Image (cartoon, rainbow, N blue to C red):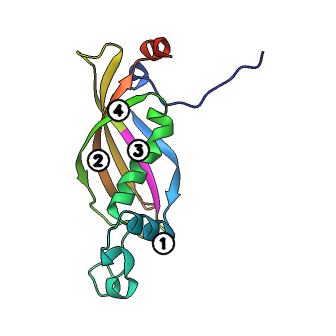
């Protein structure tokens, strides 16, 4: 028989606190990404859409939509950490954007598990708190967020299937 290896995230008991999970490849962001995301979400902020107007603003150019940056940062972590092993995202807190992300920048994300505990009310499940940090190609932090998820334990997930 041929052995099958399925790509998945990590189960609750496989996630280690104080370990840096580096999510690769990075994602080079484009003007198209920015315009499509901004218009799709009905965000009419000129800082994302109006090049001429943005030239006269403090950063001198359009900025990537911060919600795109946040979404991409979380998304970059999925295949390595939560693909098929998450039950629910419980919340995002402490979201910051200390430096702009511009068209043509590459976003690299790292995650550190800062807390985990088994659920007292949901056997076979655990609550995991993650700190996501997004950096541009120069290593400058462009975003960070604390994310809490409800995760399967391996045994309980197998029993569920």
- Image quadrant assignment for residue 157: top left
Label 1's element? helix
Q: Nearer the viewer, residue 122 or 115?
A: 122
Q: Which residue is mark 2?
A: 145
Residue drawn at the location 44% of the way across and 23% of the way down: 11
Query: Label 1: how many residues lie within 10 Å, few (<14), some (14-19) or many (20+)?
Result: some
Residues at marks 4 and 3, CA–CA distance in whole angstroms: 20 Å
Q: Which residue is mark 4?
A: 88
Residue drawn at the location 28% of the way across and 59% of the way down: 97
Residue drawn at the location 32% of the way across and 21% of the way down: 126
Q: Nearer the viewer, residue 25 or 5?
A: 5
Dot placed on the residue nearer the N-terminal end, 2 or 3: 3
Q: Is residue 9 left or right of residue 93?
A: right
Q: Which residue is mark 1?
A: 31
Magenta stretch, main secondary structure, is strand
Tell which tag, 2 or 3, sits nearer the viewer.
2
Residues at marks 1 and 2, CA–CA distance in whole angstroms: 24 Å
Q: Nearer the viewer, residue 138 or 153?
A: 153
Say how many tags the image has.
Answer: 4
Query: Residue 66's x, y, as percent?
Result: 33, 62
Query: Residue 102's x, y, as percent?
Result: 41, 70
Residues at marks 2 and 3, CA–CA distance in whole angstroms: 11 Å
Label 4's element? strand
Q: Are circles 4 and 3 on residues that touch, CB within 8 Å?
A: no
Query: Residue 2's x, y, as percent?
Result: 76, 19
Dot placed on the residue nearer the N-terminal end, 1 or 2: 1
- Image quadrant assignment for residue 139: bottom left
Q: Are circles 4 and 2 on residues that touch, CB within 8 Å?
A: no
Question: Start and end of the magenta stretch?
Answer: 106-111
Q: Which residue is mark 3?
A: 110
């Amino acid at each position: 028989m041929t052995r099958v290896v399925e790509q998945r995230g990590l189960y609750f008991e496989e996630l280690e606190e104080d370990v840096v999970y580096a999510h690769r490849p990075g994602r080079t962001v484009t003007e198209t990404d920015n315009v499509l995301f901004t218009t799709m979400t009905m965000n009419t902020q000129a800082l994302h859409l109006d090049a001429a107007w943005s030239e006269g603003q403090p950063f001198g150019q359009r900025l990537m939509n911060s919600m795109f940056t946040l979404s991409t940062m979380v998304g970059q972590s999925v295949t390595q950490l939560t693909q098929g092993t998450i039950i629910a995202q419980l919340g995002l807190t402490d979201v910051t954007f200390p430096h702009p992300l511009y068209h043509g920048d590459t976003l690299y994300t790292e995650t550190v598990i800062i807390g985990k505990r088994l659920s007292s009310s949901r056997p076979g499940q655990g609550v995991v708190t993650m700190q996501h940090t997004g950096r541009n190609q120069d290593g400058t932090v462009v975003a960070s967020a604390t994310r809490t998820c409800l995760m399967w334990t391996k045994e309980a997930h197998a029993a569920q299937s």
